[in-house]
Image (tube, rainbow, N blue to C red):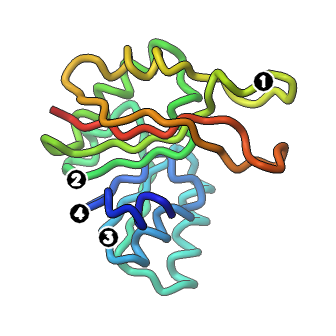
Amino acid sequence: MLLERSGELNGSILDVGCGTGENSLFFASHGHDVVGVDSSTRAIRKAQEKANERKIERVTFRLADALNLSELKRSFDNAIDCGLFHTFTDIQRGKFVKSLRSVLSTNGKYFMLCFSDLEPTGWGGPRRVTRKEIEKSFSDGWKINYIKEARFETNFHEDGGRAWISSIART
């Protein structure tokens, strides 16, 4: 994956909204200590089964609420989010940013991939996010390293849905 090849990730990783764990397993197989969290019992069970089948040990999967990450009672050098941020309402976004801040170490980085407002609305899908919404959500106590156009792999697009990829550091 791009973040691994670029060397942007160093240290421990929280995969928030990990689903069935593919990103967590990828980063753990490349030597990172990873905790994947999701609110779905079924997704966490599947993720753990994959880790066991692949004999990947540097990963832990936990049932957790992304709006209450402090309950993990630990901090991380990085957090990754591939498809969670765009599911939140405006009120939930504020809670999520505060929750995320509670588990990221100072200068820890949050890497987010979310659907962009540049994506046409014809096929439905999740809420689209504007660049300004990202900037506003992370305006207090954060430093935005970049927000770049990207593509999100979907079953509806040959070349992927339009997205934003962001690197945001906790200050």
- Where is mark 3, residue-wise? 32
- Where is mark 2, residue-wise? 77
Q: Position of residue 63 (x, y in %)?
A: 45, 51
CA neighbours of label 2 inside 10 A, class few (<14), some (14 to 19), many (20+): many
Q: Is residue 114 left or right of residue 9?
A: right
The structure residue drawn at horizontal position 29% and vertical position 51%, both measured from the top left corner, is 78
Q: Are marks 4 and 2 in contact (CB under 8 Å)?
A: yes
Instruction: Judge depth for marks 3 and 1 and give the one in front.
Output: 1
Count numbered badges in the picture. Answer: 4
Residue 167 shows which numbered tag?
Answer: none
The structure residue drawn at horizontal position 44% and vertical position 81%, both measured from the top left corner, is 56
The structure residue drawn at horizontal position 13% and vertical position 41%, both measured from the top left corner, is 106
Q: Quadrant of residue 143?
A: top left
Q: Are marks 3 and 1 in contact (CB under 8 Å)?
A: no
Q: What element does badge 4 sit on?
A: loop
**Which amino acid lies under the numbered mark 4 shown in the image of this protein?**
Gly
Q: Specify which label sits upstream in the sequence, 2 or 1.
A: 2
Q: Position of residue 50 (x, y in %)?
A: 58, 75
Measure the C-alpha gap from mark 4 to mark 2: 6 Å
Residue 11 shows which numbered tag?
Answer: 4
Does 124 sit above or below residue 37? above
Measure the C-alpha gap from mark 3 to mark 2: 11 Å
Q: Specify which label sits upstream in the sequence, 3 or 1.
A: 3
Q: What element does badge 3 sit on?
A: loop
Residue 120 shows which numbered tag?
Answer: 1
Instruction: Judge depth for marks 2 and 1 and give the one in front.
Output: 1
Q: Position of residue 153 (x, y in %)?
A: 70, 50
Q: Position of residue 67 (x, y in %)?
A: 39, 31
Q: What element does badge 2 sit on?
A: strand
CA neighbours of label 4 inside 10 A, class few (<14), some (14 to 19), many (20+): few
**Which amino acid lies under the numbered mark 2 shown in the image of this protein?**
Asp
